[in-house]
Image (cartoon, coloured by chain):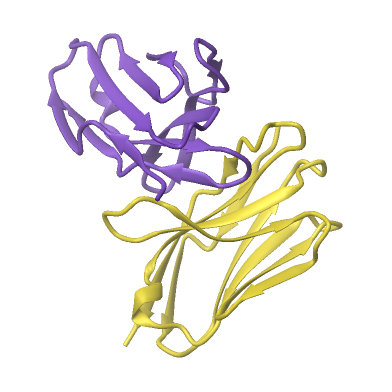
Chain colours: A purple, B yellow
């Protein structure tokens, strides 16, 4: 059974804090993605990774960075959280066509 | 780059009726078009997909059609049921993108009893 696990379902952080969102997949997938989901805007790609230590910017990378030290783990980092980063964050992985999503992390920045 | 537009943003249909959601894409080289369903509070999941060498694909009550000339594709749900209520996302994958997906904005489908 496919499993993509995000470390937190809900997070509340203060403006200026450094925030780590973790994602782990157990399917040995090469590709991993971080999306941001906002109502009416669909899924917007923040960063993706095709291999360990490899990363590519997506459509909205500003204010975010990522880390992929191991194949199964892809971390999203908000260096200094701001209120406009309040959102739902979804991690996904794929091998071939199908993307498998984590349950999402709803982040509130106060 | 690729751009995907999805309409309508909200669709309300009577239970038992059909629902159609449409998407257009801009990059004629895109070759893979999936549809994902996201129920309230849950993760998106693939429900059906189509490749550019096929015009139509069916799976029980759902079907997807692709018109490459017009660069649009549609999701058709027949005999709608309450469990079809969800947000549906279309996407397109540009050629040679390693299945990176460009997403539509989503359609909230409401099934009225």
Residue A110 shows up from this direction: no
Residue A74 pos. (x, y %): 40, 22
Closer to the camera in the image, A83 or B38: B38
Closer to the camera in the image, B14 or A65: A65
Residue B60 pos. (x, y %): 57, 80
Residue A64 shows up from this direction: yes
Position of the C terminus of chain B, as image quadrant, is bottom left
Tell me: residue B95, above or below residue A64: below
Residue A63 pos. (x, y %): 38, 14
Tell me: residue A109, above or below residue A4: above
Which residue sits at x=80%, y=62%?
Answer: B54
Closer to the camera in the image, B5 or B75: B75
Tell me: residue B104, above or below residue A7: below
Position of the N terminus of chain B, as image quadrant, is top right
Which residue sits at x=23%, y=16%?
Answer: A19
Residue A51 pos. (x, y %): 55, 19
Closer to the camera in the image, A14 or B91: B91
Q: Quadrant of residue B42?
A: bottom left
Which residue sits at x=29%, y=25%?
Answer: A22
Q: Quadrant of residue B66?
A: bottom right
Please give left or right for residue A109 compared with residue B6 in the image: left
- Image label count: 0
Which residue sits at x=37%, y=71%?
Answer: B85
Q: Quadrant of residue A105?
A: top left
């Amino acid at each position: 059974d496919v499993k993509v696990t995000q470390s937190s379902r809900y997070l509340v952080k203060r403006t200026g804090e450094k925030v780590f969102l973790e994602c782990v997949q157990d399917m040995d997938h090469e590709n991993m993605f971080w999306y941001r989901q906002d109502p009416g805007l669909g899924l917007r790609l923040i960063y993706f990774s095709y291999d360990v230590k490899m990363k590519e910017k997506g459509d909205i990378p500003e204010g975010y960075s990522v880390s992929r030290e191991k194949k199964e783990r892809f971390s999203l980092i908000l260096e200094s959280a701001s209120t406009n980063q309040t959102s739902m964050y979804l991690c996904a992985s794929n091998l071939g066509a199908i993307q498998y999503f984590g349950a999402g992390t709803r982040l509130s920045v106060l | 780059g690729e751009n995907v537009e999805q309409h309508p943003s909200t669709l309300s249909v009577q239970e038992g009726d059909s629902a159609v959601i449409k998407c257009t894409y801009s990059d004629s080289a895109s070759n893979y078009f999936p549809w994902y369903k996201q129920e309230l509070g849950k993760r998106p999941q693939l429900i059906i997909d189509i490749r550019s060498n096929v015009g139509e694909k069916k799976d029980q009550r759902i079907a997807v059609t692709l018109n490459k000339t017009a660069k649009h594709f549609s999701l058709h749900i027949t005999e709608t049921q309450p469990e079809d209520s969800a947000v549906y996302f279309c996407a397109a994958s540009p050629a040679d993108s390693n299945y990176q997906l460009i997403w539509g904005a989503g359609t909230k489908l409401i099934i009225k009893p």
